[in-house]
Amino acid sequence: MNLSNKQKQHLKGLAHSLKPVVQLGGNGLTEGVLAEIDLAINHHELIKVKIPTDDREEKSLIIDAIVRETQAVKVQTIGHILVIYKQSEQKKIDLPKS
């Protein structure tokens, strides 16, 4: 799923007040963490994930893995926070027309 800039801006506005739902621990991206992210995104559609690492390359690899494994769309990354979106069967968020 590709989002237009207008749709991404809308999602960024909605995500502004959200708190991170999932936070990666010392073990990094494990199967359990991925399952938790998948569960949360299927329930909420739009979530924040906290990735506490200072290594940019490692953070980039983790973000790519999360997006690939959950089939979500990366909306934005700010510091250690990743915002992702995945439409569920019961649409909870109405996106503007592209």
Image: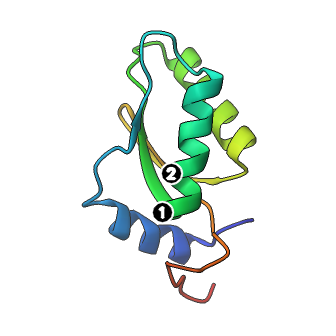
Residue found farthest to the bottom: 97
| Dot 2: element | helix
What residue sits 57% from the left and 16% below the top? Answer: 58
Is the residue 60 above or below the residue 75 in the image? above
Residue 5: mark: none
Residue 40: mark: 2
Say whether residue 59 is left or right of residue 61: left
Say whether residue 79 is left or right of residue 34: left
Say whether residue 34 is left or right of residue 69: left
Say whether residue 34 is left or right of residue 14: right
- The answer to whether mark 2 and mark 1 are in CB contact below 8 A is yes
Front position in the image: 43 or 81: 43
Separation of disc 2 and disc 1 at Cα?
6 Å
Q: Position of residue 91 (x, y in %)?
A: 58, 80
Quadrant the C terminus occupies: bottom right
| Dot 1: element | helix
Residue 44: mark: 1
Amino acid of disc 1: His
What residue sits 66% from the left and 53% below the top? Answer: 72
**Mark 2 surroundings: few (<14), some (14-19) or many (≥20) residues within 10 A:** some
**Mark 1 surroundings: few (<14), some (14-19) or many (≥20) residues within 10 A:** some
Q: Position of residue 52 (x, y in %)?
A: 38, 21
Question: Image quadrant of residue 18?
Answer: bottom left
